[in-house]
Image: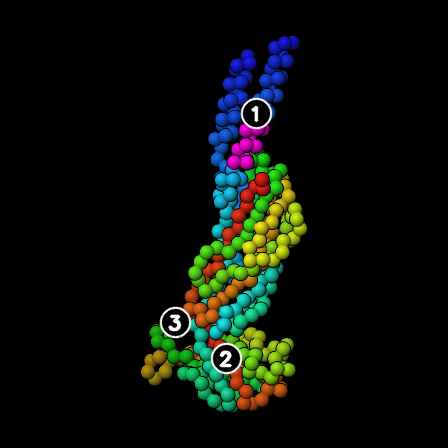
Amino acid sequence: VRTNLLFSAGHGAALLFLIAAADARAQSSTKTRAADQSLPASGSILIVDTLQVRTLQPTSVAGPGVRIEKDGTSVSVTTVLEVSGGSDRAYSLTLRPDLSERALPKEASAGSGTSGNVPATARPRRTDAEGRDVLRIGSQVYLPQHAATDEAATALIGIDYP
Amino acid sequence: MNSRIALGVLVLALVGWACPAEAQIGVSQSPAIAPDLGKVIAGSAPTTFSITSDGTVTRTSGNAIRLSNGSVTTPTISISCALLNLVNLCAVRYMQVTVQPAGGSGPASVNMFRIGSLQGASFRDGLPTPASAITFVLNPMGLGTTTFKVGMDVNVAAGAASGQQLFSYTVTASFLQ
């Protein structure tokens, strides 16, 4: 009986000792190893090239290769882009005119929806007489009905090509 | 008999002491790069795109243009205690989590974080308030995995040069003393 009691007492002491050791170990790791559980994370964004054009009058042309036409309620943006390279190159172009708020009448600028996405249209590519690739894209932005025909509008056009 | 038991206890204690503490808390993100805002035309003024924890993107200031109107995939952060992680008593301890911007000099950066709903555990002090850096405490999570989504405000500098840009941040988990 005496031997069994001693054995039990020994197990109890061992268990307490192990718990104490583990707890001390845990406390120590909190202080010194917090950085070990640090996760580097990230998001991404692709900033594309821009052309900034400004037009004030209907059928005015601003910027190389960019034509903006305005008929009172809408602005048509047509861009002709000339790039060098082989005729088999693939191009990806996007066009999204964005009218600056200051260009619109104050009462029409909020909730008018004029600065949303405008789908770009890409027309078939051709090669001009000098062997340059030519792409023509167009889109249209609608102005509020209250917009005056001589108000300034700014269009930003993003172009992404190889 | 007693000396043999004591020797065994000493050996076990030394083994436990020597176990590495690294990787006792597992922290991961899915997808690896998130969120991906896609193509953006830099504006003439600093611009902020606000991303909710469910991925909706809204331009809240500035004049840069995001070419897509679509939502993005926000990061899902997973935290877990490794199985049989008895050394640190991970499953039964409070855990402090910090989400903060990482250093970087690129034109895109995070200036606000939002923590989404939590799965697999609970906040000790309630849903954290959006801030430029967030620290919150999780109640003991047991042996399962805790996940939450992170929304954020991404700032794009005026006149940023074209190219792929990463906005970085870190998620750190540690035991609360």
Report whether residue B65 is seen. no
Crowd rating for badge 2 (residues with CA inside 10 Å; few <14, some 14–19, many 20+): many
- The quadrant the C terminus of chain A occupies is bottom left
- Please name the residue shown 55% across and 36% down the image: A27
- Please name the residue shown 60% across and 58% down the image: B130
Report whether residue A4 is seen. yes
Crowd rating for badge 3 (residues with CA inside 10 Å; few <14, some 14–19, many 20+): few
Residue nearest the viewer, comparing A96 with B9: B9
| Element at label 3 | loop
The Cα atoms of the two marked residues, 3 and 1, are separated by: 73 Å
**Image spot of residue A85 (x, y percent):** 34, 74
Report whether mark 3 lies on the same chain as mark 1. Answer: yes
The Cα atoms of the two marked residues, 2 and 1, are separated by: 74 Å
Chain of the residue that carries numbered disc 1 in the rendered image: A
Asked if the residue at tag 1 contacts the one at tag 3, i.e. Cβ–Cβ closer than 8 Å, the answer is no
Q: Which span is picked out in magenta?
A: A19-28
- Please name the residue shown 60% across and 25% down the image: A16
- Please name the residue shown 51% across and 90% down the image: A58
| Element at label 1 | helix
Tag on residue A155? 2
**Image spot of residue A102 (x, y percent):** 56, 81
Residue nearest the viewer, comparing B71 with A137: B71
> Does residue B36 lie above or below B98 as drawn?
below
Q: Is residue A21 magenta?
A: yes
- The residue carrying mark 1 is A17
Residue nearest the viewer, comparing B48 with B121: B48
**Type of secondary structure dominating the magenta stretch:** helix
Tell me the kind of residue under disc 3: Arg
Tag on residue A89? 3
- The quadrant the N terminus of chain A occupies is top right
